[in-house]
Structure formats: C-alpha cells, structure tokens
Image (cartoon, rainbow, N blue to C red):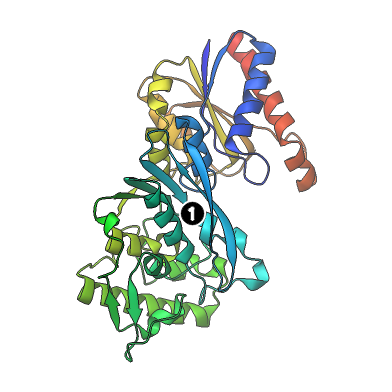
Amino acid sequence: MRIVLAPDSFKGSLSAKEVCDAMAAGIHSVLPEADVIAIPMADGGDGTVEAMVLATQGKCYTETVQGPLPNQQVEATYGILGDGVTAVIEMAAASGLDLVPERALNPRIATTYGVGELITAALDQGAETIIIGLGGSATNDGGAGMAQALGVKFYDANHKSLKLGGAALSDLETIDVSELDPRLQQARVIMASDVTNPLTGRTGATAVFGPQKGADEESQEVLDAALTRYGEVLRAQVGQDVSNNPGAGAGGGIGAGLMAFLGAEVQPGVDVVIRATHLEQRISAADVVFTGEGRIDDQTQYGKTPQGVAKTAKKYGKPVIVIAGSIDGDVSALYQEGVISIFGTIKQPGDLEDVLRNAKHAIQQTSANVTRLLVK
C-alpha cells in the first residue's frame, strides 16, 4: 500500500514534519511494508518555509532584520527552494504577532521593514521568483516599511522622511520610487494568501484584523484614515490603484504594497505549496492520503491545508483521511471534497499543556487505528 502524508503543522505542538513522522510511525506499526511518502504541508502561514524547503531539498538562511517594533532586531529564516531560484518568505518571521508580547502590541508603529530586508536577502541569493506568505502579522502599515527597506522614499508635506509604522502614513505627501531595487523589475513575486479583504473600509485591513494586533477604536480610526491616504497617493503618484483589489488588505495591508511596488500576484497559499512540493504527482500514484491540522472546524473548507489536499486528491479519486487534534463545528463540507473520514486525536478532556505535550503519541496512535481499518 502506498500512502501519502500531507498534513499541516499542529500549531503550538508539532511541526508538519513532526506530524508526518508520527503518522508514519503509527502506520508502520500496523503495516511495516507500507510505502509511506511524507510531504509536510502549509497554507502560506506558519511552517510554509520549512514545508517547501524540505519537499524540494532546498536550503534555509537566517538574517538579522528589523522586527515589528522600533529598535527591535530579530533572527528571521527564509528559504531557497531546490531549483535555486525560488525564494520563500513568511512575513511573520520578521513582522509577526508572535514576536511581540501582548502588552507591547502597537499597530500604529509596527513595521514591515524586516520583510523588505528578507526580500533583499533573497535577491542577493539570486532569487528570480519570491513567494511570500502573509499570515500572522503584527503590522498595519500597508507594506510601506517593506517598500522603504527596498529603496522607496516616503515624505510628508515638508519633504521630511516619514517614520516607520502605519500611523505615519497620515502625513504622507510624496512617494519616490526612483531608488527601488532594480532587480525587482525582473523578479516574479507571489503573495500566498487566502485573504480577499480590500485595503480600507469596513472589511479592510484595519477593521477586520486591527483588533487582534492591539488596535482600539481610536487607533482603528487613525490607521484606516492613514491607509486611505496611502492608497490615494499610490494611485496619484505611483499609478497603482490597488486599494480595492482583493487581497490588498492581507498582512495589515502589505498586500497593497506588494501589488503596487512589486507587481505581486495573489494565489491561495495551499495551492502555492501544493505546486512547489509536486504533491499532485505523488497523490496520483497513491492508494490513500492522510492529511490534517491541529484544529478542524467550519473554516477549514476555505483554503486550509486539508481542503486543498482533498481537492487535489479528488481529481484522481484517491480517498483522503483527516487527522486533527480537535474537531469543532460543522465540517461536513469537507466530505464533498473527497474526504472519507475525519478523526480527532483528543480522547478525553485534559489540561492544554498535557494535550500539546502528548500530541505526537496521540497522532501516532490514531494513525495506527485508522490503518487497521484500512487493512480489514
């Protein structure tokens, strides 16, 4: 039996590779001779770099870059895939929520400057295509910080350079792109994101995602007005009317900056990873596919890893089994995508710390039990 493993990470406990290892151990405890092919997955968020680098035998690099807050330096990792010319970056590695203590969250001053530094590093490595996952940001600056790191100048009415951060865009008067890194003209940039929100307004970056980044009502008003001004100047001076483009509001509005300055195209995150890892080819020759993530709920059907894997497997009539830490809400839509069964690994109530600590054993045990059903 040939079994393809294509799970996402179980956030907070195991990486996608570690989930694959646990699944494989469980399967082999029942079917020692099974041909198990492990392809760690991601959907553009946490774990995307690791999954894509592992699947393509690429290489990871670490850079010291500007963190989300002023005077904060962080170690951020990005990858060059096995083809040697495709880079993959998670914006959260440089500008993520996890890099800021909850009490210090401040989207008025948070910046994407470090993302621009990672793009520069990737270009220095010879990257011709740059894939950027946009999940988990602490920022709300429309990608202005990223653009500043790449050579774009932002000035106020007195021709004074703007400070970093989203609130500073309220004073934006002039954008000068003459010193934008010229290598970007030849590079293809792909935004791996499922967010379709525009830059501003009731469904924009600030209104929808600002609260989780620490924006109270007053800050939301300031930041949305600042991004509105930003969009107006982009249209008038850069010739890029991107504010209402689907995905412009992704990553605190970095979507707008990527579109306007780098000509980026938007693609669903899981689809980007599926192509880069050649998952479809592996699935076409499989007997069954295992996928999963830490929590399966009614949002999983909207571009999460299990949905993307199942959709791919459905093309070839391959059955898909989902293993999740927990199952919540109505997940019946996944059965229309080719999933034949969904299994939760948490068997009894317990302390969260214990659940996370025992995740590997629980996945292994569940995978073994599922495999016994397959061979009956």
* Residue 34 sits in quarter: top right
Q: Is residue 219 above or below residue 268?
A: below
Whether residue 168 is visible here, answered yes or no, is: yes
What residue is drawn where x is 58% and y is 39%? Answer: 9
What residue is drawn where x is 28% and y is 55%? Answer: 183
* Residue 156 sits in quarter: bottom left
The C terminus - image quarter: top right
Residue 346: x and y in percent read: 71, 36
What residue is drawn where x is 47% and y is 35%? Answer: 58
Residue 356: x and y in percent read: 73, 42
Callout 1: SS: loop
Question: Left of 224 or right of it: where is 358?
Answer: right
> Residue beneath label 1, please?
135
What residue is drawn where x is 71% and y is 24%? Answer: 365
- Foreground of the two, 359 or 337: 359
The disc labelled 1 sits on which kind of residue? Answer: Gly
Q: Is residue 19 above or below residue 261?
A: above
Residue 229: x and y in percent read: 33, 79
Residue 225: x and y in percent read: 38, 80
